[in-house]
Amino acid sequence: MDWKATARAARRPGELLIRRTNTLSDASAVLVMDTADDLGAVVATWGRTDPARSGVTSLDHARAAARAIATATIGQGDRVAFHTLAHGGRSVRSGGGRRHLARVVAEISASGRAGDDARFRRTPPVPHGSIIYVLSTFFDGAAAEIATRWRASGHRVVAVDTLPELDRGRLSAERRLALQVLLAERQDMMHQLREAGVETLHWSADIDAQLGALTRAGRRPGLQGGRR
């Protein structure tokens, strides 16, 4: 209500003049990468450092997903921030533009598996109203707990599952059974995320299809893509 303009220009008793101001606001995306695990496609190599035999790893998928989402976000004129969940991990504050994108991509590319204290996650600060992408294998529950907490506080959260398609060859019967139990527990965790309102997406090598799924999810809130 513009009282000065009303007093000066109102022509009839009770007439009020209203001033409207329209402003543009960028959307804010936050990329949160869980670096506690780096699991290869070849299950027989889990627990070993053998990149030549492990195949594509979960952190390979996480880095590819983070770079693609950051590029698409900046490309449509929005802002993006990047954090890892490890204490003392890499962080880039929210920003926009090509130079900022270059900084974000450089930090994403340099991110590797966290140290021995990786099981103790930090919860990075996120701007109010952000859409948060949590990139993780969602095995031990810490990343899922943080994602659920953010969703409960009102953020839109997308859980990006970065576990590669698994090669179960050369596994003993005992290890096959252990893997089956582990995957069943993880499936329950993903179901709990969806029940809490967190959208889920399984990342694959088809980047264009993944970004298309995220775009469709943005148009229809609550859509859960890539269920496993």
Image: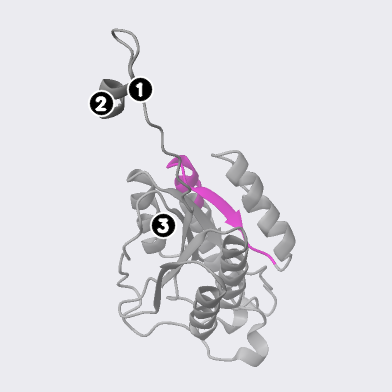
Point 67% across, 51% down: residue? 213
The percent coordinates of residue 18 (x first, y second) are 36, 25
Pick the residue in front: 22 or 107: 22
The label number, if any, that marks residue 17 in the structure image: 1
Q: Name the residue tied to disc 3.
A: 144
Q: What is the magenta range?
A: 190-204
Would you identify the image quadrant in which residue 132 lies? bottom left
In this view of the protein, which residue sits in the foreground, 5 or 128?
A: 5
- Callout 1 amino acid: Leu
Sequence order check, earlier mark of 3 and 2:
2
Q: Type of residue at label 2?
A: Trp
46 or 132, nearer to the observer: 132
> Can residue 204 be seen in the rendering of this structure?
yes
Helix, strand or loop at label 1? It is loop
- Which quadrant of the rendered structure holds the N terminus? top left
Count of marks placed on residues = 3
Tell me the tag on residue 91: none
C-alpha gap between disc 1 and disc 2: 7 Å
1 or 3: tag closer to the N-terminus: 1
Q: Depth-wise, is mark 1 or mark 3 nearer the camera?
A: 1
Q: Is residue 147 above or below residue 75?
A: above
Which quadrant of the figure has residue 77?
bottom right
Task: Name the residue furthest top.
Answer: 13
Where is mark 2, residue-wise? 3
